[in-house]
Image (cartoon, rainbow, N blue to C red):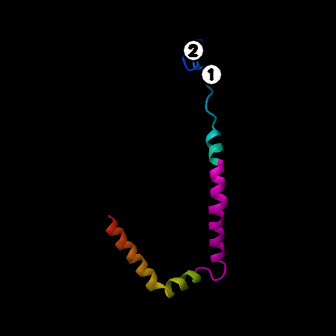
Amino acid sequence: MARTGGGTTTSGEGLRPPRVSTPWLLLAPGLAWLTFFFILPLFELGRVSLHDGGLSNYRNVFSDNSAVITRTFVYALVATILAI
């Protein structure tokens, strides 16, 4: 068994095949954080907003504030064009 300067074997005897679960174990903390602090609250907010009145709540908001919403999108469009 020949050795190189770094102490690894040249025949590959010391290498283990990668485990399939390793990437998932590395992703687990980030996925748990994303689930508990982003995805679950997002679904809870959606459920609460649709609880009383359903989509009529959103219809009322858009009809009462249509001028403000239109102005906001116009400003965003102008800012985007100027940035390009």
Tell me the residue that label 1 is attached to.
14
Left or right of 13 in this view: 71: left
Q: Main secondary structure of the magenta part?
A: helix
**10 Å crowding of disc 2: few (<14), some (14-19), many (20+):** few
Could you tell me how far apart the alpha carbons at marks 2 and 1 are, in whole angstroms?
Answer: 11 Å
Name the residue rendered at 62%, 51% in the picture. Answer: 30
Is residue 36 found inside the magenta-colored segment of the image?
yes
Q: Amino acid at mark 2?
A: Arg
Q: Is residue 37 above or below residue 79?
A: above
Q: Which mark is residue 66?
A: none
Q: Where in the figure is residue 70, as x and y percent of width and height?
A: 42, 81
Please state the total of marks drawn on the protein image: 2
Query: Within the image, what quadrant is residue 46 found in?
Result: bottom right
Q: Which mark is residue 3?
A: 2
Q: Which residues are magenta?
A: 28-55
Res 37 → quadrant: bottom right
**Mark 2 element type:** loop
Whether 54 is among the magenta residues is: yes
Q: Nearer the viewer, residue 64 or 80?
A: 80
**Dividing the picture into quarters, in which one does residue 18 lie?**
top right
Q: Which kind of residue does numbered mark 1 sit on?
A: Gly
Report helix, strand or loop for mark 1. loop
Whichever of labels 2 and 1 marks the residue nearer the N terminus, that label is 2
Left-right relation of 17 to 76: right
Q: Residue at x 61, y 29 (%)?
A: 17
Quadrant (top left/top right/bottom left/bottom right) for the C terminus: bottom left
Q: Quadrant of the N terminus?
A: top right
Check disc 1: other Cα within 10 Å, few if <14, some if 14-19, many if 20+. few
Residue 7: percent from left, percent from top: 59, 19
Residue 78 location in percent, x, y? 34, 73
Q: Disc 2, disc 1: CB below 8 Å?
A: no
